[in-house]
Image (cartoon, rainbow, N blue to C red):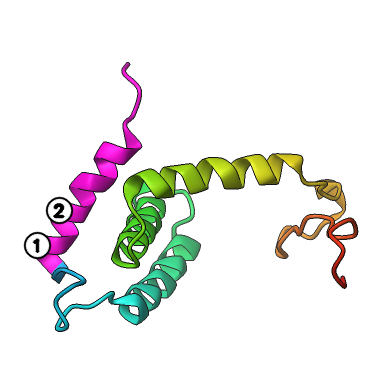
């Protein structure tokens, strides 16, 4: 199996989105930020209703890609940001997941970040 080319995937998704929803430089389409955020909220409900459906999770990812490029974020910058964020998360201290409620978010330990907790 060959490696998945996420940048190529994003470029194809941009082409589809531009054709279906308009280019961000056209004032009739714009960045569609509020519409994309509303659509993400709708899709989150669908994930709650069918949490094991990979297509519902894919909808969230596709909308995130659409939102990012419409804000001027290139696929290359997005991939770099994903890598950087993963490295940041790997370096963080996390509480023992066994002590956290499965219904609440697990936040990293902010005590060493120099800002109020």
Q: Residue at x 84, y 59 (%)?
A: 113
**Which percent across, then down, holds residue 30?**
23, 78
Q: Are marks 2 and 1 in contact (CB under 8 Å)?
A: yes
Q: In the image, 26: left or right of 85?
A: left
- Secondary structure at numbered mark 1: helix
> Residue 11 lies in magenta, yes or no?
yes
Tell me where residue 61 appears, x and y as whole percent.
Answer: 39, 54
User: In the image, which residues are magenta?
Assistant: 1-20
Up the image or down, 3 lies above or below 61; here it is above
Residue 92 appears in the figure: yes
Percent of width and height locating residue 26: 14, 77
In terms of depth relative to the viewer, which is nearer, 38 or 109?
A: 109
Query: Magenta stretch mostly in which secondary structure?
Result: helix
Relative to the observer, which residue lies in front, 58 or 53?
58
Q: Which mark is residue 44?
A: none
Asked if one can make out residue 53 in the rendered structure from this viewpoint, the answer is: no
Residue highlighted by disc 1:
19
For mark 2, what is the residue? 15
Quadrant, the N terminus = top left
Residue placed at 50% from the left, 48% from the top? 81
Asked if the magenta segment contains residue 108, the reply would be no
Give the quadrant of residue 117: bottom right
For the residue carrying disc 2, how many other residues have a C-alpha within 10 Å: few (<14), some (14-19), or many (20+)? Answer: few
Q: Position of residue 62 (x, y in %)?
A: 32, 55
């Amino acid at each position: 199996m060959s490696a998945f080319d996420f940048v190529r995937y994003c470029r194809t998704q941009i082409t589809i989105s531009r054709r279906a929803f308009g280019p961000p430089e056209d004032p009739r389409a714009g960045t569609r930020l509020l519409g994309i955020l509303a659509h993400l909220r709708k899709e989150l409900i669908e994930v709650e209703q069918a949490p094991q459906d990979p297509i519902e999770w894919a909808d969230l990812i596709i909308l995130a890609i659409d939102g990012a490029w419409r804000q001027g974020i290139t696929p290359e910058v997005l991939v770099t940001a994903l890598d950087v964020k993963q490295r940041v998360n790997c370096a963080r201290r996390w509480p023992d997941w066994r002590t956290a409620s499965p219904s609440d978010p697990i936040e990293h330990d902010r005590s060493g970040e120099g800002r109020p907790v």
